[in-house]
């Protein structure tokens, strides 16, 4: 079955400038992390590997419906979705949290981001897998 295998560069645009200037990083820079996508009752996109069958990585499942699209969020590999994003063909969008996921979904205000998202890893060993 055809697969799309790509590498996603890491975004450093929100990392404090004094940290990125010390490391001489571009806005999008290494590591480049593998991503694979293929058909699976819609489209499944696995984040962090090129092995479609490796269920040790988070993924999203994209499903077409008669009036739009549903995106299933699987941040915990092999677990129930944490939530769903709905895109209707008329341009409306919705988000629904799932209550059965082992890791609860946390809703943020529009101006917030998770504090850990843009923290620069303290050591090379904590960087995401990828090709540097």
Image: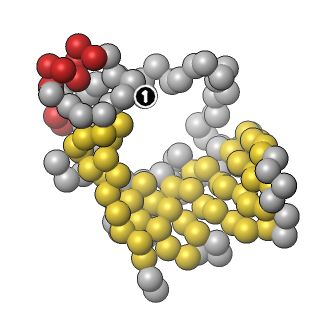
Give percent across and percent down for residue 92: 81, 47
Q: 78 or 117, which lies in front?
A: 117
Q: Is residue 85 above or below residue 67?
A: above
Is 116 situated above or below 82? above
As drawn, 44 above or below 15: below
SS of the residue under disc 1: loop
Q: Quadrant of residue 110?
A: top right
Residue at 64% x, 34% y is 105
Q: Is residue 52 visible?
A: no
Give x and y (percent) for residue 129. Answer: 26, 48
Crowd class of label 1 (few under 14; some 14 to 19; many from 20; radius 10 Å):
few
- Reply above or below: 58 against 125: below
Q: Residue furthest bottom?
A: 1
- The image shows residue 23 at horizontal and vertical percentages of 15, 26
Q: Quadrant of residue 106?
A: top right
Residue at numbered disc 1: 117
Q: Is residue 15 visible?
A: yes
Q: Which residue does the image show at 32% across and 16% down from the upper left?
A: 16
Question: How many numbered badges does the structure rendering display?
Answer: 1
Residue drawn 69% across the image and 45% down it: 83
Expressed as whole percent of the image width and height from the top left, the position of residue 50 reads 34, 66
In the drawing, does residue 15 fall left or right of residue 99?
left
Instruction: Name the residue rendered at 26%, 27% in the picture.
Output: 121
């Amino acid at each position: 079955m055809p697969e799309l295998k790509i590498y996603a560069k890491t975004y450093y645009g929100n990392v404090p400038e004094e940290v990125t200037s010390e490391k001489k990083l571009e806005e999008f820079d290494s590591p480049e992390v593998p991503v694979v996508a293929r058909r699976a009752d819609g489209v499944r996109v696995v984040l962090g590997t090129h092995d479609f069958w490796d269920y040790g990585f988070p993924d999203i499942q994209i499903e077409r419906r008669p009036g739009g699209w549903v995106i299933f969020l699987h941040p915990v590999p092999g677990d129930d979705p944490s939530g769903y994003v709905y895109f209707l063909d008329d341009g409306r969008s919705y988000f629904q949290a799932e209550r059965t996921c082992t890791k609860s979904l946390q809703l943020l205000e529009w101006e917030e981001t998770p504090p850990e998202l843009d923290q620069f890893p303290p050591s090379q060993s904590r960087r995401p897998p990828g090709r540097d």
